Image (cartoon, rainbow, N blue to C red):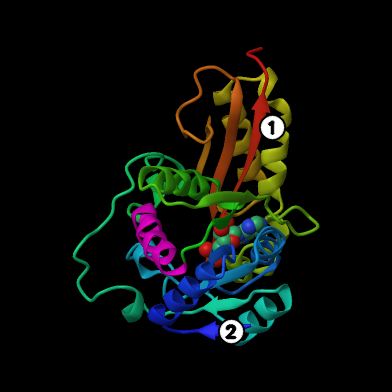
Amino acid sequence: MKIVLSSKEMQGFSKELIRQNQTIGFVPTMGFLHEGHLSLVDQSTKACDVTVMSIFVNPLQFGPNEDFDRYPRNIEQDIELARRAGVDFLFCPTVDDLYSKELPVTMTATKRTNVLCGASRPGHFDGVVSVLTVLFNIVQPQKAFFGRKDAQQVAVVQGLVDAYHFPIEVIAVDTVREEDGLAKSSRNVYLTDEERQQAPMLSRALNSAAEALSGKSIEQTIDDMTSFLKETTSGKIDYIQILHYPELEPVVEKKGEIIIALAVQFAHARLIDNIVLTLKEEK
Ligand code: AMP
């Protein structure tokens, strides 16, 4: 595995790989790797000749009062995990290398961003589309792999790729969970022992809601999830929403792909999770 620190160098490697007709799979991450990230690598190594993973904690996607400074980092462990998972190029650029001091152009994500995390974290998806535009141009992948755990991100990235005609296939990978159902996340290390006991209730609430949704109204389903999570966790519910997916529009008819998504703020970790289901017809 080659560790690449400079974007010029990374772009040079990619150009050479493309010249050799190698397909490049790309897994963008913020590091502190876990099995969720590694499942994206697994899909990439199966589908592509070469896998590039980036590790970059992107300041543009964090709000002023968010956890940019506290975001967990462990580059030595990440290098080892990436190497073992089969990453060919580990791209770890610095902020100064990736962004010019004063950005001459800024991007705003205008669709699919006024709900869920986009509503709770103003500017977050502007930062996500900005960094991915930069990374896509450096890495030049044919396929890019994203986790369904961040389902809104998948929807926004697909919009970015379509709108800007990136010749990239966006591939969504299922959420990897702990045995008790908790979605794996770098931020889980910031849960207290007590919160860690409570955290599986998030996926339990989603699963019960998914089972009950066809026989209940959206409002009732959200109310029931709210009561359940208030009873079973000490976290503060940031949002619980049920929307069409991937458009992220309000549900007018319970039909087609529907996402049930939630975010819960614990003392030092904000956890998100979701489930996407396909409903056949209105009942
Ligand atoms: P992050 O480092 O949190 O920005 O995540 C990098 C990529 O890994 C994103 O595409 C995430 O959606 C994906 N990811 C994070 N956690 C999981 C998980 N538990 N299962 C599958 N993919 C995940």
- Please tell me how crowded label 1 is: few (under 14), some (14-19), or many (20+) other residues with Cα within 10 Å: some
Indicate the position of residue 189 as horizontal and vertical percent values.
Answer: 63, 71
Q: Main secondary structure of the magenta part?
A: helix
Quadrant into which the C terminus falls = top right
Is residue 72 depicted above or below 44 in this figure?
Answer: below
The amino acid beneath tag 1 is Ala
Q: Secondary structure at mark 2?
A: strand
Q: Say which of marks 1 and 2 sits in front.
A: 2
| CB of mark 2 near ligand 1 (< 8 Å) | no
Q: How many marks?
A: 2
- Indicate which disc residue 121 carries: none
Give me the C-alpha separation between circle 1 and circle 2: 43 Å
The residue closer to the viewer here, 212 or 89, is: 89
Quarter of the picture holding the N terminus: bottom right
Could you say which disc has been placed on residue 2 in the image?
A: 2
Residue most toward the top?
Answer: 283
Picture coordinates of residue 40, whole percent (x, y): 65, 61
Residue 269 in view: no
Residue matched to label 1: 210
Give the quarter the ligand 1 occupies.
Answer: bottom right
Which residues, given as a range, are shown in magenta? 124-139
Q: Residue furthest bottom?
A: 76
Q: Judging from the image, what secondary structure is the residue with disc 1 in?
A: helix
Side of 70 where 255 appears, left or right: right
State left or right for residue 204 relative to residue 52. Answer: right
Residue 145, given in percent of the width and then of the height, sits at 58, 57
Q: Farthest front residue?
A: 20
